[in-house]
Amino acid sequence: MPRKRKAVVREVLPDPKYNDVNLTKFMNNLMVGGKKSLAEKIVYGAFDIIEEKTKQPPLEVFNTAIDNVRPLVKVVSRRVGGSNYQIPLEVNEKNGQALAFRWLISYARARNEKTMIEKLAAELMAAYKKEGASIKKREDTHKMAEANKAFAHLRW
């Protein structure tokens, strides 16, 4: 946490093909080693597969998938009186979106398809249909928060 002032939030330019800021943020999360053009190829290739299979606009499928994966609550470990408690906290929209991006990308990388384009397309379509590993992660997080609701008074 900065001592002097809040960190400046940088503006991200919208992506060239779909003119969407969230898609650019997703590409930046997907990017490894500064290879933005490769991240763009992966995302646009996945969007082509999504459009081919679902017959719907891929940006709409992407935004719905992000909304389906975005968590509303999370649990944070706090040490109170010598013991650790899992304290449920509400997630603001920006952090929830970042978690959704991270989960989608990590579970897409863990899938069994051949190329990353196919993996990402399959994970986005699964999230769109409210199934798949990233949706399970969201449900597990919500269940954990619900189970530890009794410790909500310990947050500060």
Image: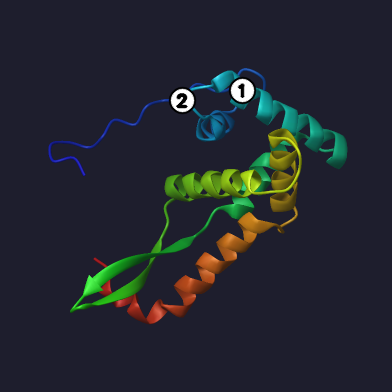
Specify few, some or many for label 2: CA neighbours under 10 Å numbering under 14, 14-19, or 20 or more: few
Residue at x 18% of width, y 40% of height: 2
Rendering coords of residue 86 (x, y %) = 36, 72
Amino acid type, mark 2: Val
Q: Quadrant of the N terminus?
A: top left
Q: Earlier in the sequence, mark 1 or mark 2?
A: 2
Residue 34 visible in this rendered orientation of the protein: yes
Q: Between marks 1 and 2, how big is the CA–CA gap?
A: 18 Å
84 or 25, which is in the foreground? Answer: 84
Rendering coords of residue 120 (x, y %) = 69, 40
* Left-right relation of 40 to 149: right
143 or 120, which is in the foreground? Answer: 120
* Left-right relation of 75 to 36: left
Figure coloring: rainbow
Residue identifier under label 2:
12
Residue at x 66% of width, y 30% of height: 43
Label 2 secondary element:
loop
Front tag of 1 and 2:
1
* Left-right relation of 45 to 151: right
Label 1 secondary element:
helix
Q: For the view shown, which residue lies furthest in the bottom direction?
A: 150
Residue 147's tag is none
Amino acid type, mark 1: Leu
Residue identifier under label 1:
38
